[in-house]
Image: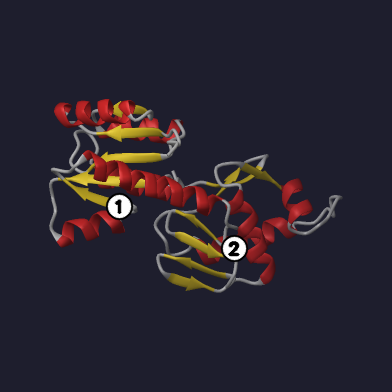
Amino acid sequence: MKVRIMKILLIEDDADVAAYIVKAMKEVGHVIDHANNGKDGLFLATTEEYAVLIVDRMLPKLDGLTIVKTLRGSGNTTPVLILSALGEVDDRVMGLRSGGDDYLVKPFAFTELLARIEILARRNRQNEGAPQTKIVVADLELDLLSRKVKRQGKEISLQSREFSLLEYMLQHKGQVVTRTMLLEHVWDYHFDPQTNVIDVHVSRLRSKIDKGFETPIIRTVRGAGYIIDVD
């Protein structure tokens, strides 16, 4: 059977375990990067593209669960296999609830590790072809099918235009969205109506999704527009 070559990131501080995994992955034809601490691992995970991340749970500088939570909070959906010597049910549940896709307890057989990451990568490729039905940024979730919005699990009632406005901004998270862009894509105006309609709607939207929460989602970029920013 032909092996589909994958680019993998291993974040593991145990030198012997890391050397074993890196050597074995290269022998089966995969490309693998290695970081021996959480800080460097998170940097690689956010600046490079990988098919799968293998993340040790106990790491120096930044622990594995924090790495996974940070990635998921920023919208990174790369599959994550968590490695850990902690094998109790509560430990595995905590790892999966933090955003991990699978959990493998040390010591392990390489054949099992390989099979698990191949399954994760294959599942991810299949999901990439499926239409997106939810947009998640930090603790805010927008469901395109049910047209419901939740923050920290609490449902927020939005009017149709507010929903469309939030959807467009979330789809461009991390980018400055100008008033012209909003007029064209949310209001279908291809001219400036010389009104404050956008400011009014953004203000209403903010009062619903930001008020009462510690971290604001929508930020104004003076002279430019708005940005979905959770940093």
**Residue 77 visible within the image:** no
Residue occupied by mark 2: 205
Q: Is residue 43 above or below residue 57?
A: above
Mark 2 residue type: Leu
Q: Nearer the viewer, residue 114 or 146?
A: 114
What crowding class fits label 1: few (fewer than 14 Cα within 10 Å), some (14-19), or many (20 or more)? Answer: some
Q: Is residue 144 above or below residue 33?
A: below
Residue 77: give x, y in percent of width and height.
Answer: 44, 48
Disc 2, SS: helix
- Mark identifier at residue 102: 1
Residue 220: give x, y in percent of width and height.
Answer: 59, 46
Nearer the observer: mark 2 or 1; the answer is 1
Q: Is residue 50 left or right of residue 206?
A: left
Q: Is residue 165 left or right of residue 190?
A: left
Q: Nearer the viewer, residue 80 or 37?
A: 80
Mark 1 residue type: Asp
x 37%, y 31%: residue: 43
